[in-house]
Image (cartoon, grey):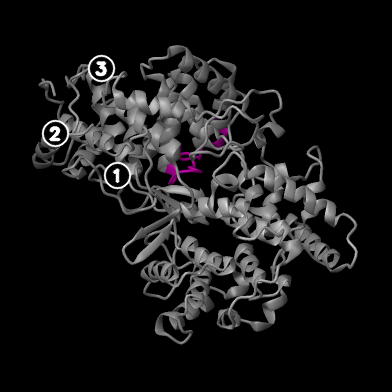
Amino acid sequence: MATSTRVGLESPVSSGATFTSRLHERLERLDEGIERGANHLLSLQVEAGYWVGELEADTTLESDYIYYLHVLGKADPERVAKLANYVRTRQLPDGGWSIYPDGPSELSATCKAYFALKLAGDPQDSPHMVRAKEMVHRLGGLERTNSYVRFYLALVGAVGWELVPAILPELMLLPNWFYLNIYEMSSWTRGIVIPMAILSALRPDWRLPERAHVDELFCDISRKKAAFDWSDQLLSWRNFFLALDRALKLYEKLPWKPLRQRALREAKSWLLDHVERTEGLAAIYPAMMNSIFALMALGHRPDDPLTAREIREFSRFEIEDGETIRMQPCVSPVWDTCIAMVALEEAGVPPDHPALVKSADWILSKQVLGAGDWQVKNKDAEPGGWVFEFRNDFYPDVDDTAFVLMALQRVKFPDPKRMEAAVRRGVQWLLSMQNRDGGWGAFDRDNNKAFLCNIPFADHNAMIDPSTADVTARVLECIGRYGWAADHPAVQRGLKFLLKDQCEDGSWFGRWGVNYVYGTSGVLRALETVSLTAKEYCQRAVRWLRTVQKADGSFGESLRSYDEPATKGQGNSTASQTAWGLIGLLAGADTNDPAIQKAAAYLVEQQNGDGSWSEDEFTGTGFPCVFYLKYHLYRNSFPLYALARFRNQAQEARQYCALTFQPGQFRLRSGF
């Protein structure tokens, strides 16, 4: 690497000379840290050109997988034992299981773990099972679990169907123009629920071993037939849908259902159509598992070529590690790749570097040019988006597409016409997905009928896909980088949504990342690209970031903030969240700001010798309050990007003269 000429930073304000001295020492290591971080990230690139980190979730996946293998008739004792080992290692001292590290015991996760371990052969009277049962009772009993726990138990005869919300395949017959139809549900809910509707109608006889009963998990055995509690407010959407649920259950008991066979044909047709051009239905865990069950219920045996293909795709989520097997909810190669590319580009990797060219070529090959569910509400737009996974053609998403376009922008690609055409299609598709309220959702346009969240099977807290601040910010950052100015109508509509969505204290909620630190950082970075961060609403957001920054310069926010807004911005320090905080501060403050310099110094100090960062917490969000994620590459990509951005902005301000990478001067580790 070329020699770096350094000019000292102005001394940050601190409480003492010792801290100031340490701060300077850490910042002096900035260039070296960026180089090591870039080399480490480059070392993780797959030969084909992409990056893919592990995507970690809670033990509900392993618990469900044990159940799935038993239903499939493929409960190999060794595999089940390894899955059960993993579940046992995650049991908390109080007997329960949480849905994120350091989180409290959660009822549905604990019930699933208990049931799975029973299937695995753990005696009911063993100490860990007794503790688990006691925790279930303290949390309210099986009668308080979510609808999906009840559905899977009913499917194998462990509880009665009266405990399960009615999910009728006749829903498929409602036309798309009708106020309530399947396309008013979020894309992931469609993938989960339509196979469940098939199963609910057919109710296959998949009874499991007698030891798998769960009556002991009820606090009140009389509640075995009481599905959900009614709202105290007599006239409410909840009570309306509970009354409708009762009516549908009565309909289900009728001997003659004139539309049932037609509805099942429509549901089967939708299912068969949507398992094509993908790695499995919606390429996500619950939809894929449910689709396999539905295919079996429809007469496709596990060894049928179609079912076998889906089973094979699903098994790729397994990660075997010694005596345990853990499961991923999906895979994230497109997402991981575009974030890594943006980080490396900011770090100074030349635009024609082989690693970037190869990843751009791979990314371009993944652009979706075929039909998808998004066209139901966006009929006139041409395809051009990108997905999260390797292949999931029905569901390109806005967030991935925006990040991909930003990643491609700086690459010097050998086929500029191919690049230009792909970018043009991508930007046009992105703009076409803007909602009427000015914001952007993830997968669909104007998917925002909030009353649907009161449907009994909507208790996964993600029934709809409305505009969110973080996705809207990503789009504005993207089109801002491509030259759209603040006065462009699309930007103005997006800004109007963001201002309406801003919290009183200046922060923004993070739907897809944890949480207010993520949302606030993303919005500030977006508004920086259109030169709006001097505005009062942005400065209020910067002030909020300062209030939640810790004395050592770091940021950390627990997933608890989704349940308890009073804890927003509070939690264990993490590398990814400190990076987000730093990115947000850089967008709205001067690089000489003490908060910025302390955050950068913290990241430099916390970097490992190999250029990586460590992080135990989950900082990704699936369904708020219900399902969370740990993206294993976040802790490396975002800190690298944040430090490089700090250095580059400081250099631009002539406060800090840092190394500028030139083609051929970026040192790579052996083999890259």
Image quadrant in which you'd find residue 215? bottom right
Task: Give the label, 1 or 3, closer to the camera.
Answer: 1
Residue in the image at 57% along x and 54% along y: 308
- Check disc 2 and report the residue beneath it: 29
In this image, 268 relative to 281: left or right? right
Tell me the CA gap for discs 3 and 2: 19 Å
* Viewport quadrant of the N terminus: top left
* Vertical side of 478 occupied by 442: above or below: below
Task: Give the label, 3 or 2, closer to the camera.
Answer: 2
Magenta stretch contains residue 503: yes
Mark 2 lies on a secondary structure that is loop
User: How many other residues sit within 10 Å of disc 2, few (<14), some (14-19) or many (≥20)?
Assistant: few
Q: Is residue 536 visible?
A: no
Amino acid type assigned to the residue bearing label 3 in the image: Glu
* Vertical side of 246 occupied by 580: above or below: above
Count all numbered tags in the image, as a single digit: 3
- Check disc 1 and report the residue beneath it: 575
Residue in the image at 27% along x and 27% along y: 347
Image quadrant in which you'd find residue 246? bottom right
In this image, 601 relative to 238: left or right? left
- Badge 1 vs badge 3, beta-carbon distance below 8 Å: no
Nearest to the observer: residue 229 or residue 153: 153
Residues rendered magenta in the picture: 499-516
- Check disc 3 and report the residue beneath it: 652
Tell me the CA gap for discs 1 and 3: 25 Å
Residue in the image at 52% along x and 31% along y: 386
